[in-house]
Image (spheres, grey):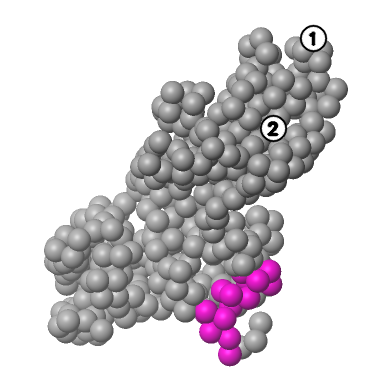
Amino acid sequence: MRQGDSDGVLVLRVLEGDTEAFAGLVARHRERGGRFAAAMLGDAADAEEALQDAFVRAYRSLRTCREPERFGAWFLRILVNRCRTRGAVRRRSAAVFVQDDVALERAAAPPVAEPEWREEIARAVAQLDVMQREAFLLKHVEGLEYEEMTRLTGARIPALKMRVKRACDHLKVLLREVDDARVRS
Amino acid sequence: MHGSAPDPLIARVADALRRPAPLTPDFDARVMAAVRRAPPALPRRAWAWLREPRVVAVSPLGGLAMAAGLAGLLLVGAMGRQPSAVSKQPSAVSKQPSAVSRQPSAISRQPSAVSEGAASVTFVFVAPQARSVALAGDFNDWDAARALMRREASGVWTVGVPLTPGRYRYVFVVDGRRFVADPAAPRAVGDDFGTPTSVVTIGGGGTHAAGGSL
C-alpha cells in the first residue's frame, strides 16, 4: 500500500482488481471500528468478529460505495448493522449484565484507578438500552452530527436526540459516585 | 464537533471510550485472508457495463442470426436430450452447467419432466442491490407473484419456468415496482404494457430468442 493513498484511491484500486489495496482500508479504519464494536457489544471477541465481518461485507459490496472518499462513514454504517445483528443474537441466547447494586457498591470505594474506571464505564455502557448505547457512542465518542447519524441509523433526529439524552442521564446516574471518587483521588 | 459542551462527566466517559480497543495481532491478516476467499469486487467498468441499460435493436436478419447463435449455445447444454431419457437421468442434466446462465442476464433451457413437451427455462438477472426480483410474462399471466426469483451469490437472481414451444414476452419486476426488460434479450417492439418487454422464443427442437414486433 502506498502510504499517501486516500480512501478514495484505495477503493478505486480495489475495484480495479487490486485486492491487496483493501489492506490499507483495514489498517486505517480498524481502530475506530474496533472501539465502536467493543463498546457496543461489550466483549472483545464478539467485537473483533463483528469488525471482521463488516470488513468482508464492505469488500464484497464495495462497488455500492458511491462516495469512495467517504469510505469511513459508509463502513461505519455496515459495522453498526453488524453490531445490531450480533447484539440481537446475543440477547436471544444470553443476557448477562451486572446488577446496578454491584456497580453502586464498587462506586462507593474510592480511590478508583484508571483500569477500574474504564471497567466501570464498560459496565455502565452495557446497561444502556441498545439503541441509546448506539446513539451515545456515535454522538459523543465518534463525534458524528445528527444528520450523519440519521443517514447511518435510519432514525430521525428527534428520536436520536432523545436516545442520546437518556443515555447521558442513565450514565450519569450510574457513574456519578465513582467519578466523584476518581476525581477526588 | 458537538452542538454544546457535554456534561464534564460525559466528556470523561467519552474520552475513556475513545481509547483503542485491543485487537489480536493477526487481525489484519485474518481479514485479508477472508477477503481473498470472498467473491471479488467487480471492476468498476465491468459493473457499470453490467448495470447499464441498453436497447437491443434487432433487424429481421439480425434477429434470425441471434436466434440461431443462442439456440446453438443452448443446444450444447441440452445436447443428448431425449424426452424418454430425461426422466431416467435427471442427475446427468444437473451436472451440466449452462454456459448461457453465467451471462449477466440470460436464458437457458434445461430438459425436465415438468410437463409433456415443456422444458425448464432458467431466467437469470443481475441486480445486487435489489431486495426482490420476480418474473412476469405471457407464461404466468403477468403475475409476478407466481415467479419469484431466487438470489444467488453476487446478486444474481434466477428462476426456472416450464415453457412449451412458443414465443413469450416477459419482464423482470425489481422490488415489486420497477419493470426492467432483459438487457441480454431482444425487445418486443410496440409493446402494449407501457414499458419495454423482452421476447424469448422456445422452439420444438431447441431454444430460440428473437426480437421484432409482436
Q: Amino acid at mark 1?
A: Ser
Whether residue A17 is in magenta: the answer is: yes
Task: From the viewer's perspective, tell me whether residue B21 is left or right of residue B62.
Answer: left
Question: Which span is picked out in magenta?
Answer: A4-18
* Count of all numbered marks drawn on residues in the image: 2
Which residue is at the front of the view, A57 or A37?
A: A57
Q: Which mark is residue B208?
A: 2
Above or below, A85 relative to B33? above
Identify the residue at horizontal 44%, vertical 55% (top origin).
Answer: A82
Q: Nearer the viewer, mark 2 or mark 1?
A: 2
Any magenta on residue A76?
Answer: no
Residue A142 visible:
yes
**How far across and how far down the image is residue B104, in percent?**
63, 49
Residue at x-position 39% and y-position 60%: A80
Contact between labelled residues 1 and 2, with CB atoms less than 8 Å apart: no
Q: Nearer the viewer, residue B7 or A144?
A: A144
Name the spot of residue B105 as percent of width and height, x first. 61, 45
Give A27 or A89, whichever is nearer the viewer.
Answer: A27
**Who comes first in sequence, dot 2 or dot 1?**
1
| Same chain for the residues under marks 2 and 1 in the image | yes
Q: Which mark is residue A11?
A: none
Taking depth in this image into account, of B60 and B142 the one nearest to the observer is B60
Q: Based on the displayed image, in which of its 4 quarters is residue A72 positioned? A: bottom left
Which residue is tagged 1? B84
B154 with respect to A47 (left or right): right
- How far apart marks 2 and 1 lie (CA) works out to 22 Å
Residue B60, given in percent of the width and then of the height, sits at 66, 42
Instruction: Give the residue furthest to the front.
Output: B60
Look at the magenta stretch and give its main secondary structure. helix
B108 sits left or right of B130 in the view:
right
Q: Residue at x 41, y 27 (%)?
A: B143
